[in-house]
Amino acid sequence: MQEIKKLLEIMQALRDPKTGCPWDIEQDFKSISAYTVEEAYEVTDAIERGDMHDLRDELGDLLFQVVFHSQMASENGDFSFAEVVEAINDKLVRRHPHVFDEEQVKDNEHLAKRWEEHKQAERQQKQTGESALDGIASTLPALRWSEKLQKRAAGTGFDWPSIHPVFDKLSEELDELHVELKQEDNHERILDEYGDVLFVCVNLGKHMKVNPEEALRHANTKFISRFTVMEKLMGEDGVSFDALTLEQMEIYWQKAKAKLSTDEHG
């Protein structure tokens, strides 16, 4: 596409040692990696807000990050933007034999199983370590990292066969956390046990086929909505948080929940 060609030319100009932008010239892979992650989050934010205008712009910003990394790699003689595109083209065709070849799939569950098998075969070809968990980025958001670790482990057979033992394990971890909370100067143990609780919650989501990141983001959004309505109701009554007891705040919280429920169904 002509637009892609122009974008690549702009990137080359920005990185030109003599006439380019000083900021762009001094960047390297590590210095812009945080921006890459930030742009991905901004894409997600636009999607959740349903703002297609912003989504278009944010996708452009994310594409620019891909071009930026590719340009620096090209300067180092590692790979080019064209090779990035070629690699993803090859991967998509390879992982979709039911579309680009004659392989048959029964349903979405079978499709997901075959997808993971294709990924596993690719990992085995380029595997440098000995662990089944090799290759999972530790820089992922913690919930997503935990989810990928547990899915990979489950692929080896290391997982509970049903959801019921997961609830038992969650109760066990909560009990252990409660014990640690009774101790003094015990922050590290509390951190450890709380982490175990969250880890089991991620496994619970896996068994329910619920994305933990999506579920928590939904809960965050719901909390914002309810808290905002609670503040509005308090403002209408001319009261503030510092004038209320926790029990009185709870009354406003319940009113906010009821109002939102009525608005949603009314």
Image (cartoon, helix red, strand yellow):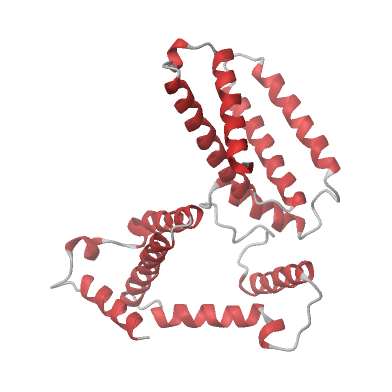
* Place of residue 163 in the rendered image (x, y in percent of width and height, measured from the top left): 82, 46
Q: Residue 251: image x %, image y %?
A: 59, 19
Tell me if residue 240 comes above or below residue 125 in the rendering.
above
Horizontal side of 253 relative to 104 (left or right) equals left
Tell me the residue at 40%/66% (across/down).
56
Residue at 83% from the left image edge and 35% from the top image edge: 168
Residue 69, image quadrant = bottom left
Q: Is residue 180 above or below residue 147?
A: above
Q: Is residue 198 left or right of residue 111?
A: left
Decide: is 61 above or below 75. above
Q: Residue at x 47, y 32 (%)?
A: 228
| Residue 34 screen position, x and y as percent | 38, 54
Pinpoint residue 147: horizontal percent, then vertical percent: 65, 51
Q: Residue at x 65, y 38 (%)?
A: 198
Observer-nearest of 231 and 143 = 231
Which image quarter is the C terminus in? top right
Q: Residue furthest left?
A: 19
Q: In the rendered image, which quarter contains the N terminus?
A: bottom left
